[in-house]
């Protein structure tokens, strides 16, 4: 019975429901499916630079109708090469009734290039599609972005 309790505890620890890096800084989304939803529901990203309205998905996008918001670090970064640590974006993904159905979030977590240098999240509370650094659900597509895995920066 002790092995079962250990297994369940170890499995829960690998779930990445919470990374423990919860922040009150509205410019930095936390990592982890449970923490990110509290942060999103608090509306912190709404202080960022956002597209004015939802729009149909862009050519090649795996997301439906959406609206993107970029934090200051992402918005203000120019040039080539990796984005600075802390650069982030939130994408609201809408259902056919015009309601937000899912969120996609990405946050630069290391100064290197590559998909593993980003934390990726996509889902809704209780339904997680992607959650972690280098999650190939996201990186497989974002590898084709013009700069460091980012297609759209809202300025």
Image (cartoon, rainbow, N blue to C red):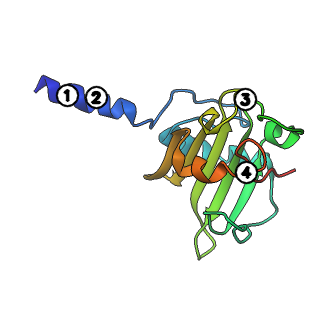
**Disc 4: which residue:** 145
Nearest the eye: 153 or 21: 153
**Disc 1: which residue:** 5
**Disc 2: which residue:** 9
**Which of pointers 4 and 3 lies earlier in the amino acid sequence?**
3
**Which of pointers 1 and 4 lies earlier in the amino acid sequence?**
1
Q: Residue at x 61, y 68 (%)?
A: 99
Is 115 rendered above or below residue 6? Answer: below
- Graded by Cα atoms within 10 Å as few (under 14), some (14 to 19) or many (20 or more), the crowding at tag 1 reads few
- Residues at marks 4 and 3, CA–CA distance in whole angstroms: 18 Å
Decide if residue 41 is in sight here. Answer: no
Numbered disc 1: secondary structure: helix
Q: In the current view of this chain or complex, which residue is farthest to the left? A: 1
Q: Quadrant of residue 4?
A: top left
Give the total number of marks visible in the rendering.
4
For the residues carrying marks 4 and 3, which lies nearer the camera in this image? 4
- Graded by Cα atoms within 10 Å as few (under 14), some (14 to 19) or many (20 or more), the crowding at tag 2 reads few
Q: Residue at x 59, y 76 (%)?
A: 97
Numbered disc 3: secondary structure: loop
Q: Are marks 2 and 1 in contact (CB under 8 Å)?
A: yes
């Amino acid at each position: 019975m002790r092995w079962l309790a250990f297994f369940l505890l170890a499995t829960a620890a690998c779930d990445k429901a919470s990374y423990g890096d919860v922040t009150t800084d509205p410019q930095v989304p936390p990592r982890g499916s449970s923490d990110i939803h509290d942060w999103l529901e608090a509306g912190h990203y709404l202080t960022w630079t956002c597209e004015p309205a939802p729009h149909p998905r862009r050519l090649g996008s795996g997301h439906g109708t959406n609206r993107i918001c970029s934090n200051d670090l992402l918005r203000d970064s120019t040039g080539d090469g990796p984005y600075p640590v802390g650069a982030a974006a939130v994408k609201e993904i809408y259902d056919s009734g015009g309601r937000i159905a899912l969120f996609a979030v990405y946050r630069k977590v290391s100064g290197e290039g590559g998909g593993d240098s980003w934390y990726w999240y996509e889902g809704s509370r209780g339904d997680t599609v992607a959650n972690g650094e280098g999650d190939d659900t996201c990186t497989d597509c974002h590898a084709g972005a013009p700069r460091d895995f980012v297609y759209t920066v809202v300025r």
